[in-house]
Image: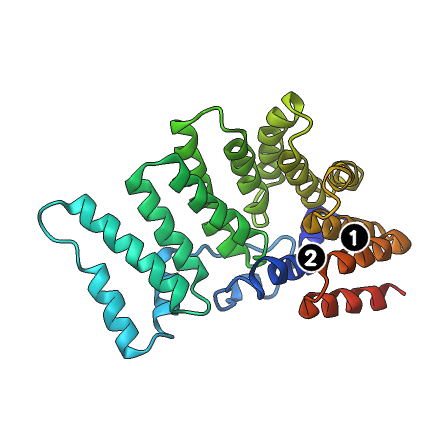
């Protein structure tokens, strides 16, 4: 199976992970005609920018909410501009997180903008991880590109402050992997190589092993994905992400028995999360 074909066919695991991480899928912007009339693996993907995301989100606000957002956006005046902007970004992040049910993208964006002004490693990595986690539940190619760009910038700024942070190195590599669905396979390999630098030095870094498992899945290197993900599950038996990815890899390879076994293992870990269990049961049924 070609890489592009796999990326289209393999989006089912994104739905499961989105349900796990967020309780729903990360918001997508309305589909456009970029892929119309062509093969989904070779069609061009239109880019998306902040203004388009803002306009789509603000169109769903009430008049009172829109007035509040506009006031914050225009609150920076003369004086201590940086302090005012930092305060505005923090308030906007809180608004999109707490007041809008599908405001994740702008919550992550303004959290990142505040972190850039604050210039603390902790804030930068927190914001970067928000984008990275969101990428794992996003199947819209244009949004993946936009989110990955922000994640990379934030991880890079964090690494400027602490070049020895392995988690940030792995996160940066993962941002290349997850943001690559509309790009060249070279971008995936660039991400894998960054993560391998950490894994070769510290084979017990399960975060690196998990992201290398993702890299193998995205690049179609299924044997390597299984090897990495099995290592994670051996060290972290309750790691639901690794378990679901193992099920997905085996399903893509046509190993129905192994895929069902890992889906059943995922169900045991999930307990009462009925929506996810329902999705997994549907997958198991389709494999039998």
Give the residue at x 79% y 67%.
Answer: 281
Q: Identify the residue position indicated by label 2 in the image.
A: 13
Residue 51 appears in view: no
- Please report the residue visible at 75 percent of the width from the left and 42 percent of the height from the top: 233
User: Residue 180 is drawn in which quadrant?
Assistant: top right
Q: Are marks 2 and 1 in contact (CB under 8 Å)?
A: yes
Q: Secondary structure at mark 1?
A: helix
**For mark 2, does the 10 Å Cα neighbourhood hold few (<14), some (14 to 19), or many (20 or more) residues?**
some
Circle 1 is placed at which residue position?
247
Q: Is residue 110 visible?
A: yes
Left or right of 41, for residue 68? left
Q: Residue at x 33, y 47 (%)?
A: 113
Residue lying farthest to the left in this orientation: 78
* Mark 1 neighbour class, 10 Å CA radius: few under 14, some 14 to 19, many 20 or more: many
Find residue 24 and report its image quarter: bottom right
Taking the spot 40% from the left edge, 57% from the top edge, the residue there is: 107
Picture layout, residue 214 above or below residue 92: above
Place of residue 253 in the rendered image (x, y in percent of width and height, measured from the top left): 83, 49
Q: Where is residue 61 drawn, in percent x and y?
A: 35, 74
Residue 213 at x, y = what percent?
A: 70, 40
User: For this view, does 145 lie left or right of residue 64?
Assistant: right
């Amino acid at each position: 199976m070609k890489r592009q074909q796999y990326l289209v066919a393999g989006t089912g695991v994104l739905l499961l992970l989105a349900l796990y991480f967020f309780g729903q899928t990360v918001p997508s912007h309305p589909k456009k005609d970029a892929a119309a009339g062509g093969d989904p693996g070779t069609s061009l993907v239109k880019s998306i920018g902040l203004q388009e995301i803002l306009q789509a989100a603000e169109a769903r606000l009430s008049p009172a909410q829109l007035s509040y957002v506009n006031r914050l956006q225009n609150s920076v005046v003369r004086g201590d501009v940086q302090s005012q902007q930092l305060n505005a970004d923090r308030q906007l992040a809180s608004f999109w997180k707490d007041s809008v049910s599908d405001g994740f993208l702008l919550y992550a964006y303004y959290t990142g903008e505040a972190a850039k002004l604050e210039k603390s490693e902790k804030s930068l990595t927190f914001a970067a991880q928000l984008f990275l986690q969101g990428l794992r539940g996003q199947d819209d190619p244009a949004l993946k590109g936009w989110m990955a760009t922000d994640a990379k910038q934030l991880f890079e700024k964090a690494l400027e402050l602490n070049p020895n942070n392995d988690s940030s190195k792995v996160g940066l590599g993962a941002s290349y992997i997850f943001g690559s669905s509309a790009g060249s396979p070279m971008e995936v390999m660039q991400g894998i190589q960054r993560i391998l630098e950490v894994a070769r030095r510290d084979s017990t870094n399960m975060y690196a092993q998990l992201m290398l498992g993702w890299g193998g899945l995205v690049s179609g290197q299924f044997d390597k994905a299984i090897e990495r993900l099995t290592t994670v599950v051996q060290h972290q038996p309750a790691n639901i992400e690794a378990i679901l990815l193992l099920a997905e890899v085996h399903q893509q390879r046509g190993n129905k028995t192994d895929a069902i076994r890992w889906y059943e293992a995922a169900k045991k870990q999930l307990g009462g999360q009925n929506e996810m269990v329902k999705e997994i049961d549907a997958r198991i049924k389709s494999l039998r």
